[in-house]
Structure formats: C-alpha cells, structure tokens
Image (spheres, coloured by chain):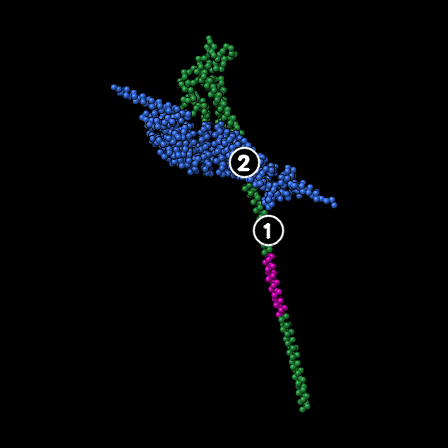
Chain colours: A blue, B green
C-alpha cells in the first residue's frame, strides 16, 4: 500500500535523476573530448524527449546540452536536423520563458553555423521568424542569442541573408545597436556586417534604416571587439558601390577612425585598414578626402608594424590609391610608400601577399618617368624580374610581376636602374629595356659615357635579334648614338676579325 | 577697099589688144579694188584692235583691282589670325597652367600631404603614449586595490603592542609596506563570497573602464558607490595616483576633443 506522498516521491526522484542526467550531459558536452563518446552512446535520441519535458528547467538544460553538442561537430548538427528537433524548438521559442529562448536560440545558432544547407534547414522550419520575434524581447541575453543565430545564418550566402532581411530583422538589429550592453552591440554589429557583405541591395537595405550613423557613433568606444565589428560592418557596406562609400564618408568617421590605426588590438587595425581600402578603391575624390586627413602615414606605419596577412589591406589600399591618378601615386611616393613596399616584398613569403605588393608597385610606377624612377631607385626592378623568372612563383605572381615590370619599364628613363636588367632578362622584357635605352641615350651624353663604361654597350652587341624586328631597330638606334669604331670594338668576334685581317695582310 | 582692109586689120589688132587691154584693165581694177578692200580691212582691224585693247585693259584692271582687294583682305585676315593665335596661345597656356595642371598647386598639395602625414604620425604617437600611460595607471590602481583587499582579508596579522606581527619583524629597519597597509585599512565583514570582479550586473561597465568622450571623475564616484562602505584607499600612495589619474583623464579628454576639432 503506497501513500500519496510515496507516489509523489517516486515522481520527484525521477525528476531529480532526469535533471541530474541532463546537467551532467550539458557539462560533459562543454568539453570537445567527450563529444565522440557521447555521440556513440546515442545522446541525441536521449535528449530529444527531454526537450518536451514538463519541468522547464530540464527543458532548458536539455536545450543547452543539445546546443553544445551541435556546436562542436557537423554530424551532430545534421543529426539534430534529421531528427526533426528543429520544428519543436521553433514552436516552443514563441511560448517559453527567456532562459529557454536563450538556449533554443543557441541550438539554432549551433546548427546554422556549419554549412549553408543546415542554415537553410533552419530557415525552412521558420527559424528566422521565430528569432526575429525573440529580437523584440526585453531581456538582452535573449536578444544577443537571437542576433547571434541570425548572424550565423546570414553569413553563408546572399539568399540566406535575403531571407533574414525579408523577415524584418534589420530595423530590430539597428535598435539592438543602441542598447547599452556591449555584448549585444558587438553581436548586432557583427550580424549587420554579415548581412551587408553579400550584395549591394542588402547593404542598401541596411543603410536605409540609418545604421551608418549609429555605427559611426560607436567608433570611439573603448571596447576592442566592438570596434572590430563596427569597422568590419562599415567596410562591408562601403565595398559595394561609390554611393554607399560616399554615405559612409559623409558620416564623418574619418579623422576619428585614424586613431584606431594604432589600437592595441591587431584586428581593429586590420579592419580600419580594410575600411580605408574599400572606400579608396571607388574613386579619386574619396581617396583625396582620406589622404587629406594624413591617412597615408597611418597606413604605412600600419604596414610596417604588422606581419603576414594583416598587411594585405594596407598594401592593397596603396595600390588602389596609386591606380587612380598620378598625383595620388606621387603622394604615395613622398610618404615613403615605395621603400615600405620593397620591405614587404622581401619580408613576406606568401605568394598572394607578394602578388598584391607587386601589383601595387606596378600601379605606382606606371604613370610617369618620375614615378618609374622612384621605383627604380628602390632597386625594385631586378626584384620584379627575379619574381617573374622564378619557377617556384605561382602563376598569379608571375603574371602580375610581368605586367608590373612592363608597365614600369615603358616609362622608366633612369639608366642606372635599367642596366641590371640588361643581363638576365628574357627577350620579351629585354625589348622594352632596349627600347627605353634607345629613347634615352640619343639625348644624354653623360648617360652614354656611363653606358659604355659599365659594359652596357657590350651587352647590347651580344644580344641576338632577328633583323627587321623591333628589337633590332632599337639596337640600331642605340648603335647610331656611338661612333662606329666603338661599336665595332664591342662587337663579339671583333678580335677574331682583326686577327683574320692580320693574316690576310701582305706587306706591300 | 584698101582702107577697109586696113580698118579690118586695124580692128583685128585692136580686137587683140582690146582683149589684152581688157584683161589688163580688169587686173588693174581688181588690184585697185583689192587695195581698197585691204585698206578698209586694215582700217577695220585697227579699230577692232583699239576696241579690244581698251576692253581688255578695262577688264584686266578691274580684275587686278579685285585681286588687290582680295590680297589685302587675306593679308589682313592672316594678321588677325596670327594675333588671335598669339592671344589663344597665351590664354590656353595660362588656363592650363592655372586650372588644369597647376604645377605649384600640385607641389604645395604634395607638401601639404607630407605635412599632414607627419602631423598625424605625431598625434598618433602621442595618443599611443597617453593610452599606454593610462593602461599603466589602471594597472597600478588595480594592483593597489588588490593589495588593499589582501590587507583587509589579512587584518588579523597586524602587530599588536605586545607581539610584533608577521610583517613587522624586529630585525627589519622599518615595517613592511603590508604592515603599514594593515594599520591603515579598516576591517570590514566581507559581504560577498565571490570576488568583486564577477558580481557585476550586465549593463553597467566596470568602474575602472574608461569611456572615451569621458565622464570626468565619474569612475571614481562609481568605485565608491559599488564598493559600498569601503574606505578610501591608503592616503599616501593613492592620493598621488588619484591626482595623476585625474590629470591623465583630463588630458586625454582635452586631447580627444582637440583631435576632433583640429581635423575640421
């Protein structure tokens, strides 16, 4: 005979053991080593009924455990989707208390982060609308979890971002930016950045809600991670078109953003450099606006201080600047950009960074002989040639260095810079070098003298060219600048010819 | 009869001579007529020549007058054109040099860019120094707070009149700084079990965090607020720090406002 109390005790015991099970699973799932074992033990099927448990605490902890499991591995996330746990979660998102909402949003985030297909599955069961509803809650923790989940969904591709935007998330995200909690601001900025990065239309939608002004206000916030996200969001907005970039500039972020170029956190610096690159690449007027604040020194110091991939936005910014017009390229030169790029070229070993550096150098040197001289005096021409000839350079690097070398050579009139190239260059580069010599030598007597004494004339005679080709014409033009005896003196085989004459000479 | 024969022979002779005289007469007459006609023709020719001569002179003179006018016109036009070319040349040179490719403007622009670069570099260096100083300051403050907290927890190690404490060994020349701290700090019953750092509500940033368009002095008020009845930190060291920190903050504030103003 069991009294009522004893029967209830049975239930309480069961509940306690369920609670304990779920909490232990949640704690175990926090460590990656245990995940395999848990998966093999079939934890997914155990957790699923606990999600529908009567006791709210157990539900929440079960959801938390599920989220942690899905977070760590791809297969578990797929298992979550396959077992149809998502529709349940989404439904209960609407009704439950805030702890459950946080945990459920965490699960959605963990599932969506692995791949676009999984994110699509989350969207398909109405996850986005439920998350947008969560964004209207008061509790900042819930908003943060929902924003994070939306961010991970929007990250994968334009279609998913579009579905997030269509659910009306963007105005709510902008409101989240204004909240006092730093973590919420960070996540909201990161989500906006993920939405904007895909297409100009999405960026325009975000801008239309007035996000730029709010982002601009947060630039001087001392929190480093927030600044990272803010700058990343601004650069994703401005990268798409001139209008968007102009709107970003009109928000007057510029002198203030330059102070973040010396921030402690290296990713803040990188994102500021990225923002500047995205703005600069559109038009010369925008570049001028940025240069007028003295940004060049900031960027060059930035490139000097950091290493590796972090340098890339700075290098590309210098390249885009120089590409627009010759006085911007001259501004880069006087800010000592060329020695810095030379340093990057020698220090970096990755080919894509070298390719970017080579491209920037080409853009700087291609405008006028002054620019080409600045590049040549930094001894960059032999280096470019070396990169072009090096068999171990990637194709991209070779193509870029060839193009850069050609464009610089066509304007270069600095003879000491051109000379080293006479010796090792292949014929397609050589013809440009010789062409330049044929342009410079007729007018400059000192250069002619130098050319002879340094052995350049000798080398030119040794070049074999097909008669009638452009190379031969240039060689003839060069030979015409010198007296005939000198040319004959340096012709290969001249000593043999002389000796032959001696043999044939008969004393009269 | 004889006279008739003579007349007949005379007539025959005359007949012959008549023929001949007729011929001669015709010839003389034709010759005379020819002379007349020739004279008439040459008269006509001469008159025709006179007419033609006058006419040709007239037309030629008219043509020459026209040619002279045209040449004059062309000379004038050439002159005008040359003057116009001179004016246009001067104008185009001026316009190009002033508006399209102003060498001096470009030179001063590039100098301005270099100057701005240096300015920004200097200001960023100053900013970095200031930030570092602030961070050091904060670190020091934190360290001091940790020491005071330690002193509070170790209040029982204070030396008494009878028995010198751990930090006040009789072999030392002067008491250890911990001993001095212990003497100054007032004991409080610890109200929180967890260390101060974690029990902060989410919204309020930590009191030692700075917000840039800063609240002057408010971090200090916040400290005194969140730490309830906690006493003021040890007077000697903290007063200096307090002054220094406040000075640093005012400097950074002014600086940041200056930076923002200077760039416009």
**Residue A100 appears at what percent x and percent y?**
35, 27
Location of residue A130 by image quarter? top left
**Residue B160 appears at what percent x and percent y?**
46, 10
Question: Is B126 positioned to the left or the right of A169 in the image?
Answer: right
Residue A288 lies in the magenta-colored region: no
- SS assignment at label 2: loop
Residue B55 lies in the magenta-colored region: yes
Q: Is residue B56 visible?
A: yes
Question: Which mark identifies residue B119?
Answer: none
**Residue A335 appears at what percent x and percent y?**
55, 34
Location of residue A364 by image quarter? top right
Query: Does A488 sit above or below residue A183?
Result: below
**Residue A205 appears at what percent x and percent y?**
41, 37
Location of residue B33 by image quarter? bottom right
Q: Where are the magenta residues, as a range?
A: B43-69
Residue at far front of view: A503
Residue at far right of view: A508
What residue is pinned by disc 2?
A391
Q: Is residue B119 visible?
A: no
What residue is pinned by disc 1?
B79
């Amino acid at each position: 005979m069991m009294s009522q109390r004893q029967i209830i005790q049975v239930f309480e015991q069961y509940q306690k053991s369920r609670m304990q099970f779920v909490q232990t699973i949640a704690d175990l799932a926090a460590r990656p080593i245990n995940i395999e074992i848990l998966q093999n033990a079939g934890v997914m099927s155990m957790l699923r009924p606990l999600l529908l448990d009567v006791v709210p605490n157990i539900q929440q902890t079960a959801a938390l455990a599920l989220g942690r499991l899905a977070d760590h591995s791809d297969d578990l996330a797929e298992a979550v989707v396959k077992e149809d746990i998502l529709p349940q979660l989404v439904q209960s998102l609407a009704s439950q208390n805030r702890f459950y909402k946080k945990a459920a949003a965490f699960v959605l985030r963990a599932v969506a982060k692995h791949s676009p297909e999984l994110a699509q599955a989350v969207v398909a069961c109405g996850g986005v609308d439920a998350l947008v509803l969560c964004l209207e809650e008061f509790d900042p923790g819930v908003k943060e979890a929902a924003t994070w989940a939306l961010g991970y969904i929007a990250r994968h591709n334009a279609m998913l971002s579009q579905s997030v935007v269509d659910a009306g998330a963007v105005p709510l995200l902008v409101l989240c930016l204004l909240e006092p909690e730093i973590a919420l601001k960070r996540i909201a900025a990161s989500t906006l950045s993920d939405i904007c990065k895909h297409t100009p239309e999405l960026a325009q939608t975000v801008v239309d809600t007035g996000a730029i002004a709010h982002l601009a206000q947060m630039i001087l916030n001392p929190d480093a991670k927030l600044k990272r996200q803010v700058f990343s969001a601004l650069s994703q907005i401005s990268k798409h078109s001139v209008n968007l970039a102009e709107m970003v500039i009109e928000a007057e972020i510029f002198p203030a953003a330059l102070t973040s170029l010396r921030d402690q956190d290296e990713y803040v610096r990188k994102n500021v450099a990225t923002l500047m690159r995205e703005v600069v690449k559109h038009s010369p007027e925008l570049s001028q606006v940025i240069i007028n604040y003295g940004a060049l020194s900031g960027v060059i110091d930035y490139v000097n201080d950091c290493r590796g991939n972090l340098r890339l936005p700075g290098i590309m910014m210098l390249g885009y600047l120089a590409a627009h017009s010759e006085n911007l390229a001259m501004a880069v030169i006087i800010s000592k950009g060329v020695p810095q790029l030379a340093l990057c070229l020698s220090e970096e070993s990755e080919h894509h960074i070298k390719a970017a550096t080579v491209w920037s150098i080409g853009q700087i040197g291609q405008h006028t002989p002054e620019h080409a001289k600045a590049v040549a005096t930094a001894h960059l021409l032999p280096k470019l040639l070396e990169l072009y000839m090096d068999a171990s350079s990637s194709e991209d690097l070779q193509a870029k260095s060839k193009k850069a070398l050609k464009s610089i050579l066509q304007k270069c009139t600095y003879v000491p810079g051109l000379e080293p190239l006479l010796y090792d260059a292949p014929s397609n580069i050589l013809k440009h070098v010789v062409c330049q010599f044929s342009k410079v030598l007729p007018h400059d007597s000192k250069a002619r003298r130098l050319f002879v004494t340094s052995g350049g004339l000798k080398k030119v005679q040794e070049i074999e060219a097909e008669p009638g080709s452009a190379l031969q014409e240039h060689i003839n033009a060069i030979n015409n600048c010198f007296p005939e005896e000198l040319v004959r003196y340096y012709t290969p085989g001249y000593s043999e010819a002389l000796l032959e004459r001696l043999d044939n000479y008969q004393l009269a | 009869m004889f006279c008739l024969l003579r007349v007949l022979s005379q007539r025959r002779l005359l007949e012959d001579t008549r023929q001949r005289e007729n011929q001669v007469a015709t010839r003389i007459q034709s010759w005379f007529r020819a002379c007349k006609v020739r004279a008439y023709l040459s008269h006509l020719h001469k008159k025709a020549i006179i007419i033609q001569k006058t006419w040709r002179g007239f037309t030629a003179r008219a043509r020459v007058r026209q040619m002279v006018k045209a040449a004059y016109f062309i000379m004038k036009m050439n002159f005008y054109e040359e003057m116009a070319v001179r004016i246009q040349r001067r104008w185009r040179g001026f316009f190009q040099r002033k508006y399209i490719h102003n060498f001096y403007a470009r030179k001063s622009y590039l100098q301005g860019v270099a100057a701005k670069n240096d300015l920004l570099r200097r200001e960023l260096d100053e900013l970095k120094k200031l930030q570092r100083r602030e961070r050091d300051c904060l670190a020091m403050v934190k360290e001091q707070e940790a020491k005071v907290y330690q002193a509070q927890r170790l209040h029982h190690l204070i030396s008494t009149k009878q028995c010198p404490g751990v930090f006040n060994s009789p072999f030392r020349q002067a008491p250890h700084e911990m001993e001095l701290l212990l003497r100054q700090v007032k004991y409080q019953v610890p109200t929180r079990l967890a260390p101060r750092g974690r029990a902060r509500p989410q919204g309020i940033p930590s009191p030692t965090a700075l917000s840039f368009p800063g609240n002057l002095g408010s971090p200090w008020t916040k400290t005194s607020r969140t730490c309830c009845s906690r006493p003021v930190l040890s007077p000697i060291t903290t007063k200096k720090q307090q002054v220094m920190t406040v000075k640093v903050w005012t400097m950074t504030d002014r600086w940041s406002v200056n930076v923002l103003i200077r760039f416009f």
